[in-house]
Image (tube, rainbow, N blue to C red):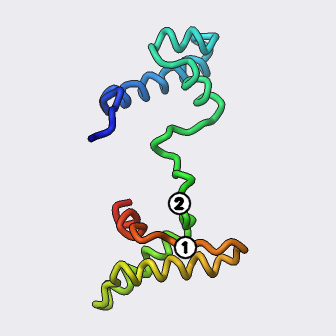
Amino acid sequence: MPPIRSRSSKDLIEQEGRLLLAIQAIKKQEIRTIAAAARTFNIPRSTLRDRLNGHAERSTIRANSHKLTETEEESLQKWILSMDSRGAAPRPSMVREMANLLLEKRGTTLVLSVGENWVTKFVKR
């Protein structure tokens, strides 16, 4: 069963535009309060307040459930492309082994490892 979405992506894009306009109006002091700006631009007051306090949009934030850091993922991606350019495209088991090696070399006391489906999800990203 597909997830239930309360809004279409078009509505969210429009809301993002209204948020930017509201932030601009507050910064130019055309509107004095967050509540008034939220009412004027028909956006949630809490979202506007969060954005004014420096919170980023959810779609741009990296999830915190990743086992590898961005740098480790980039180096893994470069390794995969390097192997592929040499005509030896790595199999999923090889990619998983390399990811586990990166985690092992990190030097944390807790030994982490990636799961069986991790490679598939990594490729989708």
Task: State the SS at label 2.
Answer: loop
Res. 36 mark:
none
Q: Which residue is the site of mark 1? A: 113
**Label drawn at residue 66:** 2
Q: Position of residue 5 (x, y in %)?
A: 34, 32
Answer above or below: position of 90 versus 47.
below
What residue appears at the point 39 percent right and 81 percent down from the top-left corner?
93
Residue 33 horizontal/vertical position (percent) = 63, 11
The residue drawn where x is 59% and y is 75% is 103
Depth check, front residue: 53 or 118: 118
Kindly indicate the quadrant of the structure image that contains residue 45: top right
Front one among 113 and 8: 113
State whether residue 7 is above or below residue 100. above
Q: Residue visible at 68% across and 71% down?
A: 110
Disc 1, SS: loop
Rendered-image quadrant of the N terminus: top left
Q: Is residue 3 left or right of residue 48?
A: left
Residue found at the very far front of the displayed protein: 1
Q: Is residue 38 above or below residue 60?
A: above
**Amino acid type, label 1:** Ser
The quadrant the C terminus occupies is bottom left
Which one is closest to the eye, mark 2 or mark 1? 1
Residue 79: percent from left, percent from top:
43, 81
Quarter assignment of residue 48: top right
Local packing at callout 2 (Cα closer than 10 Å; few below 14, some 14-19, many 20+) is few
Image quadrant assignment for residue 24: top right
Kindly identify the amino acid type of the residue bearing the numbered disc 2: His
Is residue 121 shown above or below 72?
Answer: above
